[in-house]
Amino acid sequence: TDIFESPDFYEIDDLLTDEHKLIRQSVRDFVKKEISPIIEDACQRAVFPEHLVKKMGEMGIFGPTIPQEYGAGGLDYISYGLMMQEIERGDSGMRSTASVQGSLVMFPIYAFGSEDQRHKYLPKLASGDFLGCFGLTEPDFGSNPSGMKTNLKDMGDHFLLNGSKMWISNAPKADIAVVWAKNEQGRVKGVIAERGMEGFSTPEIHGKWSLRASCTGELVFDNVKIPKENILPNIDGLKGPLKCLDNARYGIAWGALGAAMDCYDSARRYALERIQFDKPIASFQLIQKKLAEMLTEITKAQLVCWRLGMLKNAGKASSAQISLAKRNNVEIALNIAREARQIHGGMGITGEYPIMRHMMNLESVVTYEGTQDIHLLILGKEITGIQAFV
Ligand code: FAD
């Protein structure tokens, strides 16, 4: 009885290949079988469902656009987007795990790593044998990562890594961390830190009201010896982490759409079933207005995602285009979650329905990977040529 109906008001499915639809269906089935039944409890108890990492790996959800020779999927960006949409329909925290692993850990190792690093890490990350995390944000440097204090000192046969990273998804459970740090010349470099290295710890951040099924932590480096072969050789400067973020933000644009669809679907069905004043509440104009606006925004966001995916496939998507999609889609998803919460009345605040969980999750999604306002200012710079955020 609980069949998810993906709104497709503009027949956007016509723009997808049979392979895309097959991939979407298989991830949708996976979410229904493995994520939806356990996620409410995991969030209520704030437990990361660690067993799903291996299962997501088996489903090919990690780094699906990375070539098959590294154990990954070799798929296009529409496939990747559809996967993120379906996972986040389940839960934004699970999608965060997938985004970090694929776009923020596997992508930089593939794009900036040596052939040895690619072969050493990518197959294990793709399969979920390894969990990775991405350390850019610091306690004093969030929106402005260029100010980072974490630093690398060249000791001849190795580097010494010192500093700390904050708000790092997957950190407490991660086997490896892609860490961005400044060298002695002040240039941002990427290094791979491995769990077990002396002086490296990953304390967990507790008490979140959002992304409760995702584990978040700090990365603390106290004179950690990083072997020279662990530096990412083919990147220099802040554009390294920013390129990773472009990829992850692209996935988030699709993911937020998935959360929005789930809220819409739940609200539509609840409105048809819930009787007040002897009628289904769906018969009241104010409820219809909410539903009509949800469908309108979902349809627009679907078209943005599809077109952006085609631009990504052609290697043409700009950072500003990605900012527009991430900002718009997370904002509409959050608004849809809030309106859906109202349609569910008191029931909307309980774990009987996914609404409140999506809503609270989206409060992180709207802040991480560039806040709403920072993406707005990126667009402002694109339009005017004037950078307003420094
Ligand atoms: P701040 O940068 O302090 O911003 C505070 C407010 O000021 C915001 O509203 C912001 O828009 C505004 N502001 C800042 N500068 C300007 C300006 N110039 N003009 C106008 N307004 C401005 N980071 C990682 O590196 N890896 C991760 O895996 C990761 N996972 C995360 C998971 C969660 C659950 C959360 C909450 C965060 C995560 N982050 C991660 C960090 C995230 O990217 C940062 O929180 C985000 O970049 C914002 O930084 P901040 O929290 O320090 O806020």
Image (tube, rainbow, N blue to C red):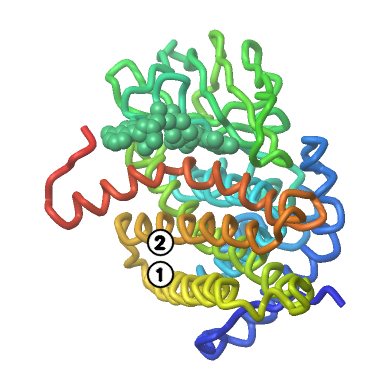
Q: Is residue 49 above or below residue 23?
A: above
Q: Earlier in the sequence, mark 1 or mark 2?
A: 1
- What amino acid is found at the position of numbered circle 1 in the picture? Leu
Alpha-carbon distance for marks 1 and 2?
A: 8 Å
Q: What is the number of the mark on residue 64?
A: none
Residue 381 position within the rendered picture, expressed as x and y whole percent measured from the top left: 19, 49
Question: Can you tell which quarter of the image residue 6 is in?
Answer: bottom right
Out of 389 and 132, give the one closest to the viewer.
Answer: 389
View quadrant of ligand 1 = top left
Camera-near label (1 vs 2) is 2
Residue in the picture at 51% in, 57% down:
335
Estimate how packed mark 2 is, as few (under 14), some (14 to 19) or many (20 or more) residues with alpha carbons within 10 Å. many
Instruction: Identify the image quadrant of the C terminus.
Output: top left
Classify mark 2 as within 8 Å of ligand 1 or not, answering yes or no. Answer: no
Residue 369 position within the rendered picture, expressed as x and y whole percent measured from the top left: 46, 43
Q: Is residue 303 above or below residue 67?
A: below
Residue of label 1: 308
Estimate how packed mark 1 is, as few (under 14), some (14 to 19) or many (20 or more) residues with alpha carbons within 10 Å. many
Residue in the picture at 54% in, 22% down:
227
Give the structural element (helix, strand or loop) at label 1.
helix
Instruction: Identify the image quadrant of the N terminus.
Output: bottom right
Residue in the picture at 54% in, 8% down:
223
Q: What is the number of the mark on residue 325?
A: 2
